Image (cartoon, rainbow, N blue to C red):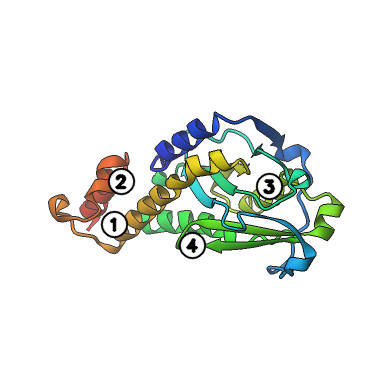
Amino acid sequence: MKLYDSIIEETLGALAKGTPKCFSYEKEKPWSCLENTEFIMQRDAGPELGGSGEPSVNYTCVTTSGLANEDEIIVYGQDIPEIKKDTAFARIVILETCDLKESEDQEKTFQTIRNMEFVRYHVFPEGYMVRVSASSNQEQVRIAKSAIKKGICFSKVGAAYIKKYKEIPEIKKVRVIFVTEKELVNAIKGNAEKVDAITKTLTHILDGMPTDCGHCSMKPVCDEVDGLKELHLGKKAAK
């Protein structure tokens, strides 16, 4: 599965302008999570991530190319305890998986990818309220003052996400990237739309989109992304 590789490379290239702080999942204790989302009143919260009109973005990329070769959390910019005012925010997840193309059931492959993507809606760190907009790919986070006093930080929150992702058998390694530098967030915002375009094209392919590439609205995406056209032709041959 290399459909998202170019986006991963663009993301890592843009972030290379910053200075990363890296944390191994094996050495981090995941922050405690709740069964459901927690509502945090503004008066009980510290600075918001992605709040007050600050840019924010969230997207997930799947790969089998070794672009996530260990379970780790990477932070660009200030960590939670250092943030004193509302700030820009991005959370990017790179998932290294088994070779999903080994499966002859393409619908099952796509559903597996969707299950991986939906994990982001099912992690509820205590004192860390996430608001995700699927339409705009924005993610805003309100953090309780009580959680800040208890020592919440990105490495522990990231470890909680990794723990949840590791429940999916097809996932081998997980890299969770947090960004609070405004310049870097703005530099990678456009990649979320590209991820959406690939995912929507996959949906259309598996729903039986037209096999005449010359009359297909998704042709520009297939032409740009390695592997999509082959997937489409493979779907056609299977019918």
2 or 4: tag closer to the N-terminus: 4
Q: Secondary structure at mark 3?
A: helix
Disc 3 or disc 1, which is closer to the eye?
A: 3
Task: Give the CA distance from mark 3 to mark 1.
Answer: 33 Å
Picture coordinates of residue 99 (x, y %)? 45, 42
Q: Which residue is mark 2?
A: 228
Q: Are marks 3 and 1 in contact (CB under 8 Å)?
A: no
- The residue at the point 79 percent across, 65 percent down is 44
| Quarter placement of the N terminus | top left
Task: Give the CA distance from mark 3 to mark 2.
Answer: 31 Å
Q: Which residue is mark 1?
A: 205
Q: Which residue is mark 4?
A: 134
Task: Give the CA distance from mark 4 to mark 1.
Answer: 21 Å
Q: Are marks 2 and 1 in contact (CB under 8 Å)?
A: yes
Task: Name the one closer to the observer, 161 or 208.
Answer: 161
Q: Is residue 212 something that shows in the picture? A: yes
4 or 3: tag closer to the N-terminus: 4
Task: Name the one closer to the observer, 127 or 111.
Answer: 127
